[in-house]
Amino acid sequence: MNLFLKIFLWFLAAIFLMLGVLLFLNWTVQTEPTVSRWRVSVRNQTNLYSTAAAQIFEDRGEEGLTKFLEQIRGTEGIIGEVDVVGEDGRVWAPRGVDVRNYEELIKRTFASNDVEMENREPESALTAKRFTANGKQYLMILRWERAKITPFFGESPLRYA
């Protein structure tokens, strides 16, 4: 094997090693923190929305709650599904959503005092939080658009303007 071929093969090996290091760094530095920040943000927003729903339901009744749910549906990051479910199974403003698909999430949320999250679908996630209004237990279910991961060497979709 001549010297030129040896140098060329070592050069290729170095390039592949550097590419592997760059891919690894891109994944560890950008992907994990982005997903972690998104989870914290979604949990905090779910807490705020459920607290607001409880106050609105107590102050303005069912009509006020229904208007509030309609307003939330237009919020960035939420994909249409915003439901409040009572202990009796009644759903406010369901828009054709069958909450029987979320029975496990509903059971977990009524048993917990924290925000519960379900990540079954690749493009979205569900969160649910229990709240008390007018002496009864309810829970709020929200479907969130999942965080978009920064493309390799590309512009971040999560960049603040």
Image (cartoon, rainbow, N blue to C red):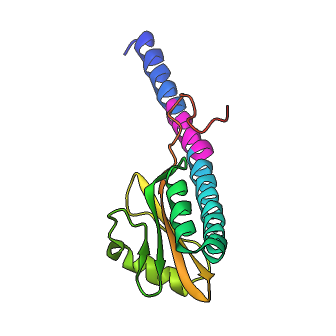
Nearest to the observer: residue 116 or residue 73: 73
Residue at point 63%, 56% (across, down): 41
4 in relation to 151, above or below: above
Q: Position of residue 39 (x, y in %)?
A: 58, 59
In the displayed structure image, the side of residue 108 where residue 32 appears, left or right: right
Please indicate whether residue 36 sits to the left or right of residue 12 in the image.
right
Q: Identify the residue at image location x=56%, y=61%.
A: 68
Of 65 and 39, the residue lying toward us: 65
Q: Where does residue 86 sit, x and y in percent of width and height?
A: 48, 82
Report the quarter where the N terminus lies.
Answer: top left
Q: Is 153 covered by the magenta stretch?
A: no
Q: Is residue 31 above or below residue 133?
A: above
Identity of the residue drawn at 36% across and 62% down = 95
The residue segment tinted magenta is 19-30
Q: Nearer the viewer, residue 17 or 53?
A: 53
Which quadrant holds the C terminus? top right
The image position of residue 100, as x and y in percent, is 33, 76
| Residue 51, placed above or below residue 40 | below
- Inspect the magenta stretch and tell me whether residue 25 lies in it: yes
State whether residue 71 is above or below residue 10.
below
Residue 63 image point, x, y percent: 53, 68
Where, by quadrant of the figure, is residue 2 drawn? top left
Please name the predominant secondary structure of the magenta segment in the image.
helix
- Count of numbered labels shown in the rendering: 0
Q: Residue at x 53, y 87 (%)?
A: 111
Out of 145 and 21, give the one closest to the viewer: 145
